[in-house]
Image: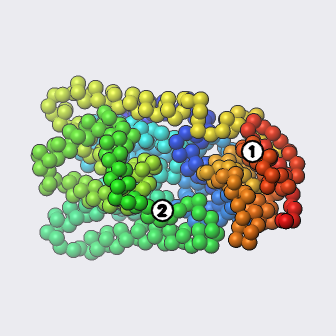
Amino acid sequence: MLYFTLLLNAVLHLPFVSLPPCSIHVWRQCNTLAVARNFHEEDANILKPRVDCRFESDGVTGMQFPLYEWLLSQLYKVFGEHYEVHRTFSLLITSLGIIYLFGFMKVVTRNEFTAACCAWCYTWSPELFYHGFNALPDILALSSGIAALYYFSIWIENKNSSFFIISMLLITISGLVKLQYLMLGAVMAGMIINEWRITKYKFTSKQILMILSGIIPVAITLIWYRYAVQLIHISGLTDYGIEFRPAENFSAGMKTLKDNLLSDWPELLFNYANSLLILIGLFLVIKLKKWNSPGFLPFLLLTLTYLIYHVIELRQMEVHQYYMLPSLLIGIPLIGLAVDFLMRRNLQWVLALILCTSPILAAVRILPARWMKTDLGIPKEFIHTPQLSRLQTALPPNSKVLIGPDKSGCIYFYFLHQRGFGFTFSDDLILPNENGELKISEYIGRGAEYLITSDHQIPIKPELIPYLQKLILQEGDFSIYRLKTLPQK
């Protein structure tokens, strides 16, 4: 069943492997791909990630540990920079997460069929089905965290220290790539406490070593994020905000929580079929009072840790559902309970119906809305290869370019393969700075040589006409101008 899960997942994704970054959260995909490209083209130093909207700087700024981006840049060196490379890379990472989830649940449940069903349900999370094929570091963090749980559970079984070391390395990678995935350490903590119970709450040297070893991933992760914040402060480039984002107020927070509970979790995170299994599993936990079972404490600690994280980042949960991906690992044990219950009650036909419905719901939810629409959420010129190629090659290499209007601050830069100055709205260019100088004049003074814009009003704005020296290219809605410097009057 596991092999069929992996095969079906790949088959459903492969028709879209050549798609550019597009659809929901395309800005996050473009930012990720831009950093990977800059590792490939400029400097492969993983400690110095670079963004495109960098003004006159070198673009180095702080972000989560850019392991996904760096690994992708190494693949670019081998296979070239193509959309197929990053999509296949993400699909491979997701597939490894599915395999490790199967392995972890097999150790926990001691039932291969139940583990396979859990891996199947995990695969058909619509949010994972979508982002597991995108340039998103969260996928690496999630899969690394699941792999860490697998090796830790193996270590609990046979006490081979090599598995413990591997699990610590993987949970460190998971936290470095995305800080919130350190919460999976709560599962490990629950397993350690269960082991502690067996020894009648006596501390042994091995248990003390485990606790100290658990501190290392947290320390390394926090050191990186402190360094990243320093880079942001030095550069002034805030593409990646490293901060807590609670709800703006109580009313907004309650609305977000309501949407999460009634829509995001049942539809996007788990899908409705899996949600039915989760409800059955939750009912069983309450009815059977499994408080003293070995799996309850790790499950409880993870749930509590996740809820704290969810509240701290509640503003992100309003539209960034991929921040909720860790909650999948709360639902999976409940799915396992439901599978066992239905099998023991000879309700295999009910289970089969739910399992067969799961991939259908995931595909119906994602494919038409995200990858099969005419409007992919990016300008049409970026989809049409000849047009995009002409826009990308119209300027000399390493030109300092002023690009916009682009609210994302990265989509235009990535597709046009340019670096330099960005603006959100066209009127931003005619706003005065603290010295009374127009922004466009300031940017020219700081090195901007060309303007690329999709706003047809810019060339006819009286305030901007004096700064436009020559039209170089008109391609669809995009125009490229050579800029000139004029004294302010």
Q: Nearer the viewer, residue 204 or 253?
A: 253
Secondary structure under tag 2 reads helix
Task: Name the image quarter holding the N terminus.
Answer: top left
| Residue 37, image x, y percentages | 67, 52
Q: Residue at x 37, y 43 (%)?
A: 264
Question: 119 above or below 488?
Answer: above
**Residue pointed to by mark 2:** 176
Residue placed at 50% from the left, 32% from the top?
Answer: 369
Q: Is residue 464 visible?
A: yes
Q: Nearer the viewer, residue 429 or 200?
A: 429
- Disc 2 marks a residue whose amino acid type is Leu
Q: Circle 1 — which element?
A: loop
Cα distance, mark 2 to mark 1? 44 Å
The label on residue 457 is 1
Residue depicted at x 35% and y 50%? 255
Indicate left or right for 15 with 386 as reference: left
Q: Residue drawn at (35%, 47%), measured in percent from left and top?
A: 260
Q: Amino acid at mark 1?
A: Gln
